[in-house]
Image (cartoon, rainbow, N blue to C red):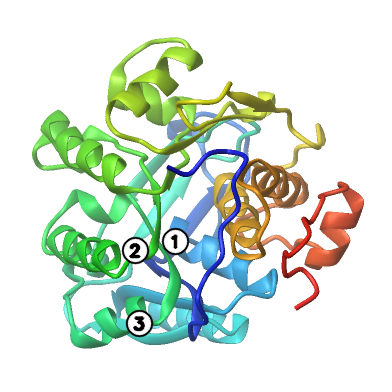
């Protein structure tokens, strides 16, 4: 059983990570106000799995994306960004009928509120190319947004089952929201089943509240482990993260920067730093510190694509400690 003190090694693959899920337009308000009061919005690249991949590509990883967008001008805009970042799009699907999804988000220094307009993302279909991409990757990542409706949900479950069968490292972001699911709160059963299959999950306090109801962070972690979670990284927002494997004493890692401009994409940038650390042979707990370090740079800009420094600069600035036998020099 993986613990927070352990590190991993991976066989050579064509890709370090393949992510499955949405890429969309984030319409972020210019005002810091409740969403219903916001009038002016700016267009940004968005979608949690897409954000994770962009950040991981910038941190010198080889990335591939499984997604579906509308064959429209917004879809072209997103595709151009992904291509320019160097992300492999062999498994990108283009929908002739449904449009590219859009989410409206209020600018906030806390957890933002949002309103989603779904489209092509719901129609993601399984294919042999998807299976091949997963098979040629070290890590498989997905979130919960794409799971909320079929056929994308059934496609995701097939992809997850295949990744587990092929013994891939499965990273899952369990951000359940009942209002996105036709089944309402019954959808939580699917999320909890996937939590038990994942190697690592990274919920926020809001995610935990929507899955379990009001409780304290320590109890949330116990509930995730009771549902079968192996490694839990509970995000506390401005208070950092709690890292737990269910056996050793949980570890609290404070935030690395108190300067906050915009928290949009902070969780995705944490994922990118954390998974980069895992791929580079860092212990889980040191990988979480790297996740905090990348997020600290991200929240000092606006939008999920705000820049982060090169990986070597980040690990030097925050004194991230590579271990003997790691591959930071590769």
Q: Nearer the viewer, residue 253 or 179?
A: 253
Question: Could you say where residue 118 lies in the image, as x and y percent from the top left?
Answer: 26, 58
Question: Could you say where residue 231 lies in the image, as x and y percent from the top left?
Answer: 46, 38
For residue 239, above or below residue 95:
above
Q: Nearer the viewer, residue 232 or 177?
A: 232
Give the quarter of the figure containing the C terminus: bottom right
Rounded to the nearest whole Å, what is the CA distance between mark 3 and mark 1? 15 Å
Task: Identify the residue at horizontal 48%, vertical 56% (top origin).
Answer: 26
Question: Could you say where residue 104 lies in the image, as x and y percent from the top left?
Answer: 43, 48
Eye-nearest disc, 3 or 1: 3
Which numbered marker is on residue 133? 3
Which numbered marker is on residue 49? 1
Mark 2 touching mark 3, by CB under 8 A? no
Q: Indicate the quadrant where residue 263 lies.
A: top right
Element marked by disc 2? loop
How crowded pointer 1 is (Cα within 10 Å; few <14, some 14-19, many 20+) is rated as: many
Residue extending farthest to the top is 215
């Amino acid at each position: 059983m993986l613990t927070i003190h352990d590190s991993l090694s991976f066989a050579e693959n064509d890709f370090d990570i393949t992510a499955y899920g949405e890429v969309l337009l984030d319409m972020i308000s210019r005002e810091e106000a409740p969403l219903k009061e916001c009038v002016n919005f700016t267009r940004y690249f968005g979608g949690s799995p897409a954000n994770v991949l962009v950040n991981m590509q910038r941190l010198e990883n080889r990335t591939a994306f499984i997604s579906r967008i509308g064959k429209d001008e917004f879809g072209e805009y997103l595709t151009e960004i992904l291509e320019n970042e160097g992300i492999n799009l062999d498994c990108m699907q283009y929908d002739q009928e449904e449009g590219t999804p859009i989410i409206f988000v209020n600018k906030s220094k806390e957890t933002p509120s949002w309103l989603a307009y779904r489209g092509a993302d719901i129609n993601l279909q399984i294919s042999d190319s998807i299976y091949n991409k997963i098979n040629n990757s070290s890590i498989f990542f997905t979130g919960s947004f794409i799971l909320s409706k079929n056929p994308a949900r059934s496609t995701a479950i097939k992809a997850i089952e295949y990744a587990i069968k092929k013994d891939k490292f499965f990273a899952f972001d369990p951000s359940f929201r009942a209002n996105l699911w036709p089944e309402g709160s019954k959808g939580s059963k699917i999320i909890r089943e996937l939590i038990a299959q994942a190697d690592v999950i990274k919920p926020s306090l809001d995610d935990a509240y929507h899955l379990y109801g009001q409780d304290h962070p320590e109890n949330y972690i116990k509930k995730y482990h009771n549902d079968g979670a192996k490694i839990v990284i509970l995000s506390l927002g401005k208070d950092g993260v709690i890292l737990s494997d269910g056996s050793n004493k949980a570890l609290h890692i404070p935030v690395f920067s108190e300067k906050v401009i915009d928290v949009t994409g902070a969780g995705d940038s944490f994922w990118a730093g954390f998974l980069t650390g895992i791929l580079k042979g860092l212990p889980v707990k040191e990988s979480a510190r790297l996740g905090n370090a990348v997020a600290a740079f991200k929240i000092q800009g606006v939008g999920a694509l705000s820049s982060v420094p090169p990986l070597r600069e980040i690990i030097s600035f925050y004194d991230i400690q590579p271990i003997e036998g790691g591959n930071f020099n590769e």
